[in-house]
């Protein structure tokens, strides 16, 4: 029976706690009724208060404690119900966690995982809906991963905990209730490897986290209209799998990048720069990029619908940007029939994704 994303995160954490007595989990909501979206359910009762516990509202102190534990040989996992909460520990993350190995001549290892939940919903607005992966990707010493599927969540969580470097684990709340989807690669990938979710020949669509699911919807609909899209799931953001993305772009000659963060000074710009440098005369059209505008996320659902790129708008821009022949309005009609919960006017992706966070 297919397992949900959040169930596999729970299994990965459980296995790591069982396999290594040095693994510890702590954060807000770890042991409350919600059990951190269900991802930590039963772990405190199974492993005790010394290894799975709540923290006070002092993220900076908790991160400093985690750094000290990691240096002493433990493998702590610090959890933030919203990535925005991690900003109060930015000094620890940027100046201490990221640089301790370098400043010690690699004598001190920092096997630390910081879970950051992102994603829109419930009118959370400017300070509860940010996606800071590009910010942390600019900090040497940090590794950034962003799973898109339950399989990714399980593999990347276990690999992150076993990693001797600090890892930022970007986790979209809309993924928690998703079940496994088939992919071109069923083998366990390395922590920095990207994944081709769907092979194609007309267009390369690169994304990460929940954006991969949006890309797969687009590819599914456009396949009915004769457009064969290759969907690339980045999985790792820093470092990112340049070779796989370049080879895919070289094959199709057309590239779309969907970022879940801001468009300006973000991940899509870095990928575009690399592709232009590597494939200057091999792309048939300029790269098309989607992302968030340079403004805080609105709390109003109506304004939020305009803030986030909708699949309907992406259909239209893809058609005209690449001079394709499909009818984008027909594509929108097919989308609503195949994926009724994909409408941009709905602030939850499906019935199962609910709650204030």
Image: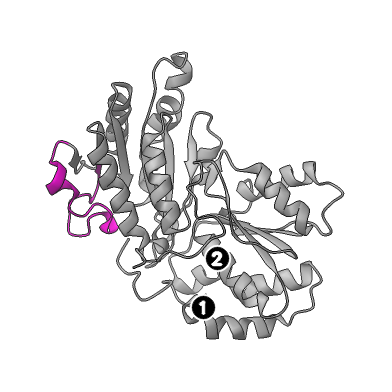
- Magenta-drawn segment: 26-50
Residue 96 point in image, percent of width and height: 41, 25
Quarter of the picture containing the C terminus is bottom left
**Crowd class of label 2 (few under 14; some 14 to 19; many from 20; radius 10 Å):** some
- Can residue 48 be spotted in the picture? yes
**Crowd class of label 1 (few under 14; some 14 to 19; many from 20; radius 10 Å):** some
Residue 82 point in image, percent of width and height: 36, 51
What's the distance in space between the residues labelled 1 and 2, CA to CA? 14 Å
Residue 65 point in image, percent of width and height: 27, 29
SS state under label 1:
loop
Query: For the view shown, which residue lies furthest in the right direction?
Result: 281
Q: Which residue is mark 2?
A: 307
The part of the image, by quadrant, that contains residue 192 is: top right
SS state under label 2:
helix
Q: Is most of the magenta stretch helix, strand or loop?
A: loop
Name the residue nearer the viewer: 222 or 251: 251
Q: Which mark is residue 195?
A: none
Name the residue nearer the viewer: 116 or 227: 227
Going by the image, does 106 lie left or right of 242? left
Going by the image, does 291 lie left or right of 47? right
Residue at image coords 62%, 76% = 312
Q: Is residue 42 magenta?
A: yes
Residue at image coords 35%, 46% = 85
Query: For the view shown, which residue lies furthest in the front direction?
Result: 187
Q: Is residue 264 magenta?
A: no
Q: Which mark is residue 343?
A: 1
- Can residue 266 be spotted in the picture? no
Residue 255 point in image, percent of width and height: 72, 58
The part of the image, by quadrant, that contains residue 184 is: bottom right
Going by the image, does 66 lie left or right of 241? left
Does label 1 or label 2 sit earlier along the sequence?
Answer: 2
């Amino acid at each position: 029976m297919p397992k949900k994303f959040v169930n596999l995160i729970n299994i990965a954490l459980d296995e790591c706690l069982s396999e290594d007595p040095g693994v510890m989990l702590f954060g807000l909501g770890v042991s409350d009724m919600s059990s951190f979206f269900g991802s930590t359910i039963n772990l405190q009762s199974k492993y005790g208060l010394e290894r799975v516990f709540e923290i006070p509202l002092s993220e900076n102190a908790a991160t400093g404690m985690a750094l000290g534990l990691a240096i002493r040989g433990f493998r702590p996992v610090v959890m933030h119900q919203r990535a925005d909460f991690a900003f109060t520990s930015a000094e620890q993350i940027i100046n201490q966690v990221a640089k301790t190995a370098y400043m010690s001549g690699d004598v001190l290892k920092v096997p630390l995982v910081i879970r950051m939940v992102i994603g829109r919903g419930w009118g959370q607005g400017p300070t509860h809906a940010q996606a800071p992966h590009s910010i942390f990707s600019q900090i040497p010493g940090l590794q950034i991963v962003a799973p898109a599927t339950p399989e990714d969540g399980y593999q990347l969580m276990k690999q992150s905990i076993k990693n001797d470097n600090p890892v930022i684990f970007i986790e979209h709340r809309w993924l928690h209730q998703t079940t496994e989807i088939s992919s071109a690669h069923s083998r366990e990938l390395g922590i920095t490897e990207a994944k081709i979710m769907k092979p194609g020949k007309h267009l390369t669509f690169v994304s990460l986290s929940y954006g991969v699911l949006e890309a797969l919807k687009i590819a599914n609909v456009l396949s009915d209209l004769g457009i064969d899209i290759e969907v690339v799931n980045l999985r790792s953001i820093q470092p990112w799998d340049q070779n796989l993305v370049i080879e895919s772009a070289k094959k199709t000659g057309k590239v779309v990048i969907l970022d879940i963060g801001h468009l300006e000074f973000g991940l899509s710009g870095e990928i575009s720069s690399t592709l232009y440098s590597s494939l200057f005369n091999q792309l048939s059209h300029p790269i098309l990029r989607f992302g968030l505008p340079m403004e805080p996320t609105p709390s109003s659902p109506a304004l939020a619908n305009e803030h986030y790129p909708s699949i309907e708008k992406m259909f239209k821009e893809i058609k005209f940007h690449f001079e394709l022949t499909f009818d984008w309005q027909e594509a929108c009609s097919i989308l609503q029939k195949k994926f009724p919960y994909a409408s941009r006017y709905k602030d939850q992706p499906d019935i199962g994704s609910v709650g204030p966070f």
